[in-house]
Image (cartoon, rainbow, N blue to C red):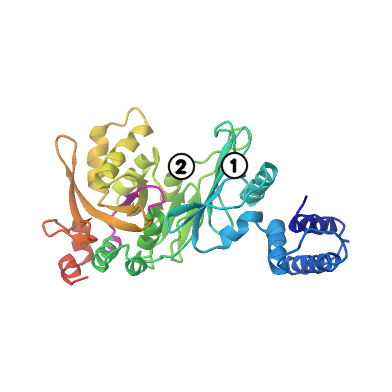
């Protein structure tokens, strides 16, 4: 038997189909139509055998969510405490709060799930079907949507929505949340201002993009920034920003625009600084070439630690072609990437910066030297007294690193 919400939703949809030309449209008119339908149902339920209505306000919200929002997922999207939503098919809907996952009581039909995905993808010009069984897209609020369907997934549609929860927008916000010390924040602010090339590393959901956004907030107000991403996520609080996004192939398999091409296009757009949302494949080679030309940049990278991040930076460019060798890549990484900032996620969901290291030269054996300026010793991020925190770019920018680090956090 259908619920009151389902019956009312069908009734409102039927009224919308019969609506006369010239009738009022828009959210206000729809909300009024839904309110009248709910009030009418409430009156009829006194004399007719109808499913219980419950809270009229809740029912109105559920119907409006189904008509203009994303149905049963809309309350989860509206909840500011929820960071991510994922569905293992229509009957298992999970959320993450504070980095900790939990199973919700929500359920839906397979048909409703497919219709919901189609509605999410409608404004993006992207699709998911047998010919393109996975997709990345951005929702109107900036949340990142990923869908993968059978036969790539086993029997069910898998949907992930990573919400754009902007709890921290500047480095000082991370300090207030306990994810970074004030001393390390001053050092990173000076590093960005001095034009150091910084790579943010960490695991999935460790807070790489959040830290990247906070670092970008320290860029000078007169700089022109070009961002390159698979799907728009980076937010730079400056006026002169050009944001580029990859494009998937069309139905004929043509028209794809990847990260490598966007990095090349970015260089033609007069950038003072480039930001690559996430380095995953051969675009690492093009990024190194750009940084090697004297253009400052920021990027993120999946890695388990600073050393692993440097190793990956030396490995990914080899995917660009058989003529690319480690003899070229390793010295180039050592000469162009100045610092790696590693972020970690604790079992309780807490995210924090756990390592800040400067890159040195490459040894004859092909190993890049590292100077760990700040490390997490188990009692929080600590300045290492034996580390060399200086860099030639600090001196050229007129930054006094000793003074920055000398004051107590």
> Does residue 168 appear anywhere in the picture?
yes
Q: Nearer the viewer, mark 1 or mark 2?
A: 1
Is 13 located above or below residue 61 in the figure? above
- Mark 1: which secondary structure? loop
Q: Is residue 165 left or right of residue 330?
A: right
Q: Residue 47: give x, y in percent of width and height.
A: 88, 65
Residue lying farthest to the top in this orientation: 322
Residue lying farthest to the bottom in this orientation: 407
Q: Is residue 237 left or right of residue 247?
A: left
Mark 1: give few (<14), some (14-19) or many (20+) Cα within 10 Å. some
Quarter of the rendering containing residue 224: bottom left
Q: Residue 289: give x, y in percent of width and height.
A: 33, 43
Q: Whole-Å distance between the Cαs marked 1 and 2? A: 35 Å
Q: Residue beneath label 1, please?
A: 89
Q: Residue 295: give x, y in percent of width and height.
A: 33, 53
Is 254 located above or below residue 214 in the figure? above
Q: Which residues are magenta?
A: 192-206
């Amino acid at each position: 038997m259908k619920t009151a919400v389902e019956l009312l939703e069908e009734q409102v949809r039927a009224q919308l189909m019969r609506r006369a030309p010239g009738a009022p449209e828009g959210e206000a008119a729809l909300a009024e139509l839904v309110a009248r339908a709910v009030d009418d149902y409430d009156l009829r339920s006194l004399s007719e055998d109808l499913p219980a209505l419950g809270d009229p306000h809740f029912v109105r919200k559920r119907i409006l969510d189904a008509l203009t929002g994303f149905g049963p997922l809309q309350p989860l999207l509206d909840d500011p405490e929820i960071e991510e939503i994922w569905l293992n098919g229509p009957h298992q809907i999970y959320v993450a709060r504070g980095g900790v996952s939990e199973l919700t009581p929500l359920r839906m039909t397979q048909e409703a799930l497919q219709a919901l995905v189609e509605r999410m993808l409608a404004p993006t010009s992207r699709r998911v079907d047998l010919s393109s069984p996975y997709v990345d897209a951005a929702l109107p609020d900036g949340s990142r949507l990923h869908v993968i369907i059978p036969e790539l997934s086993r029997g069910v549609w898998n949907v992930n929505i990573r919400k754009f929860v902007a709890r921290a927008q500047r480095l000082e916000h991370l300090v207030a949340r306990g994810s970074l010390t004030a001393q390390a924040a001053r050092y990173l602010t000076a590093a960005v201002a001095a034009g150091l090339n910084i790579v943010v590393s960490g695991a999935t959901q460790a807070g790489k993009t959040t830290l990247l956004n906070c670092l970008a907030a320290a860029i000078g107000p007169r700089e022109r920034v070009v961002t390159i991403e698979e799907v728009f996520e980076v937010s730079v609080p400056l006026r002169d920003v050009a944001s580029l996004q990859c494009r998937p192939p069309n139905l004929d398999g043509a028209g794809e625009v990847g990260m490598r091409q966007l990095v090349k296009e970015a260089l033609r757009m007069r950038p003072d600084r480039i930001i690559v949302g996430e380095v995953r494949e051969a675009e690492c080679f093009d990024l190194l070439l750009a940084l090697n030309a004297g253009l400052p940049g920021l990027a993120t990278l999946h890695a388990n630690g600073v050393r692993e991040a440097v190793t990956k930076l030396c490995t990914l460019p080899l995917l660009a072609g058989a003529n690319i060798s480690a003899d070229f890549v390793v010295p180039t990484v050592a000469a162009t990437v100045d610092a790696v900032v590693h972020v970690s996620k604790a079992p309780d969901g807490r995210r924090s910066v756990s390592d800040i290291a400067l890159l040195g030269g490459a040894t004859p054996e092909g190993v890049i030297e590292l100077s760990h300026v700040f490390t997490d010793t188990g009692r929080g991020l600590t300045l290492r007294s034996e580390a060399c925190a200086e860099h030639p770019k600090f001196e050229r920018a007129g930054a006094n690193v000793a003074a920055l680090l000398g004051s107590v956090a």
